[in-house]
Image (cartoon, rainbow, N blue to C red):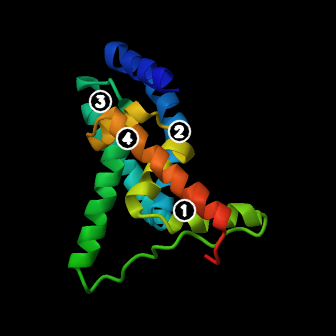
Amino acid sequence: MPDDSRRLLERYCRDGDQGSFSAFYRGQADRLWRYLRLRGSAPEPAYDLLAEAFLRFIRVICRDPRHPVALLYRIAVNLQIDAWRRRQASPEQPAAATDPEPVAAAVTDDRETVRRLLQSLPPDEQNLLLLRYWIGLTHKEIAGMLEKPEGTIRRQCAGALAALRQRWREKPDV
């Protein structure tokens, strides 16, 4: 997937091929929206953040399209953090709901347990596991996004996954 994304954006930057950018957008928009929702945005604000992230992304991507997916996610996360800070600084505005929508009845007990166990991890570990296994970014893309060495990301992902597995084995009341 990372090579396909990079290839699409290289065509967009080199040839101005709008179809290539549209294909990239279709491949990333839903996953990024779900990621923003998992990180605590309500549905409508997540759509707003998604639109703003792509707007800012399109302005800078042709300068350096090496890690496009990581760049897009970094932009979106930074926008989400900025929005959260603005809400905290404005007490007259009610804070948006931070919990994801209620889990649909069709979701299995195991998925619910995994979700709760994931939420019991520290936020940095949650983020790594979501980026790696939910979104499907490579260790290299995550490293570029977080500006850390790839080996560090690989080790941190392995540690977070080991912690999640240990909690799964113990299955405490979460």
Three-letter code, disc 4: Ile
Three-letter code, disc 1: Leu
The Cα atoms of the two marked residues, 4 and 2, are separated by: 14 Å
Residue 136's tag is 2
Q: Which residue is mark 4?
A: 153
Q: Disc 2 vs disc 1: which is toward the camera?
A: 1
Q: Of label 2 and label 1, which has the lower sequence position?
A: 1
Q: Of label 2 and label 3, which has the lower sequence position?
A: 3
Q: Disc 2 vs disc 3: which is toward the camera?
A: 2
Three-letter code, disc 2: Gly
Q: Of label 3 and label 4, which has the lower sequence position?
A: 3
Q: From the top left corner, tell me how far across and down residue 145 is, in percent.
A: 32, 40
Q: Are marks 2 and 3 in contact (CB under 8 Å)?
A: no
Decide: few, some or many residues near mark 1? Use Cα within 10 Å; few <14, some 14-19, many ≥20: many
Three-letter code, disc 3: Ile
Q: Residue at x 29, y 35 (%)?
A: 149
The Cα atoms of the two marked residues, 2 and 1, are separated by: 16 Å
The Cα atoms of the two marked residues, 1 and 3, are separated by: 32 Å
Q: Residue at x 29, y 65 (%)?
A: 83
User: In this rendering, would 2 be left or right of 77?
Assistant: right
Q: Which residue is mark 3?
A: 61
Q: Of label 4 and label 2, which has the lower sequence position?
A: 2
Q: Which residue is mark 1?
A: 118
Q: Residue at x 64, y 61 (%)?
A: 168
* Residue toward you, 97 or 20: 97
User: In this rendering, would 131 be left or right of 145?
Assistant: right
